[in-house]
Amino acid sequence: MLSHLPNLGVGLGFRELFKSELFLNRQPVDFLEIVAEHYLDAPAAKQQELELLAAHFPLIPHAINLSLGSAEGLDRDYLSKLAALIKQLNPPWWSEHLCFTKAGGIDIGHLSPLPYTQEAVEVVCRNIAEVRRWIDVPLILENISYLVALPGAEMTEAQFLAEVAERADCGLLLDVTNLYTNAVNHSYDVQQFLQQLPLERVVQLHFVGGHWHDGVLIDSHSHSTPAEIWQLMDDVVAKFPVKGMVLERDENLPAFAELVAELQQARHIARSHGKWV
Ligand SMILES: [Fe+2]
């Protein structure tokens, strides 16, 4: 099923701050990723913005607060709104993180890691089965960055991602910056991680740069992509059937030309591996 998804190419996480520059420089941007939460219960101006974006770019909805790892199940009210947005856009795929953001009725406001256990796999698969009753567009799951690794792991992070993706029949959104950041902060081997992922399920990538704080690498989406992450992207694109790559810059936004230069570098990597030519 995933092999039939279209090649979208090189995309940008849409941010309102660069909207005018984006429309003056549409050509280097093949598609946009939009944060789903910005358009749920949206005022008329946001709804119009969404229609404008959809008229000019393929849009991929990226959800943040579905909380697929919540043991108590999903928030049906939120899910129905998300389903309506995805139905409106009818994208080739949509994405959410493999994490939890809500527990015991409390919204944590943070992408929090799950324990890498069989029980957590079952919780996520049960929630994804519920999602499927509302949304029939293919879902791809993103690896998050985390500062605390929960105790009691029965498998590695990569095995956890692989197990959920296989059992729930989902694709993967491999955030190479999150992967690199976790590998640095938790001292694990990136290549070993990649070997444990199901090759055919990696549909999309995220990339951006972070910053160092007190000896810890922070995934702050605030800097240009560093050489180590470009190298990792090159390795990943060589191995996996990637159909789209998204620059996910949020903070410290540079001149739009700098974002375009990063998109061009990503495109160059894809082409050097015979993708999308
Ligand atoms: Fe990401």
Image (spheres, rainbow, N blue to C red):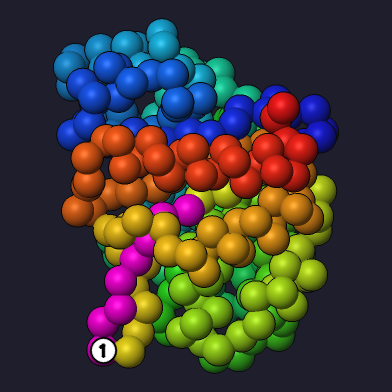
As helix, strand or loop, the secondary structure at mark 1 comes to loop
Q: Position of residue 76 (x, y in %)?
A: 45, 40
**Left or right position of 264 against 273:** left
Which amino acid does the dot numbered 1 rest on? Asp
Quadrant holding the C terminus: top right
In magenta, the rendered stretch is 207-214
Counting from the top left corner in percent of width and height, residue 32 is at 44, 29
Q: Residue at x 52, y 69 (%)?
A: 228
Q: Is residue 198 visible?
A: yes
Quarter where residue 262 is shown: top left
Prevailing SS of the magenta stretch: strand
Q: Is residue 173 magenta?
A: no
Residue drawn at 62 percent across, 46 percent down: 269
Near mark 1 (Cα within 10 A), the count class, few <14, some 14-19 or many ≥20, is few
Residue nearest the viewer, comparing 255 with 12:
255
Observer-nearest of 160 and 136:
160
> What residue is disc 1 on?
214
In the rendered view, would you say 226 is above or below 76?
Answer: below
Q: Is residue 239 above or below residue 56?
A: below
At 74% from the left and 77% from the top, the residue drawn is 192
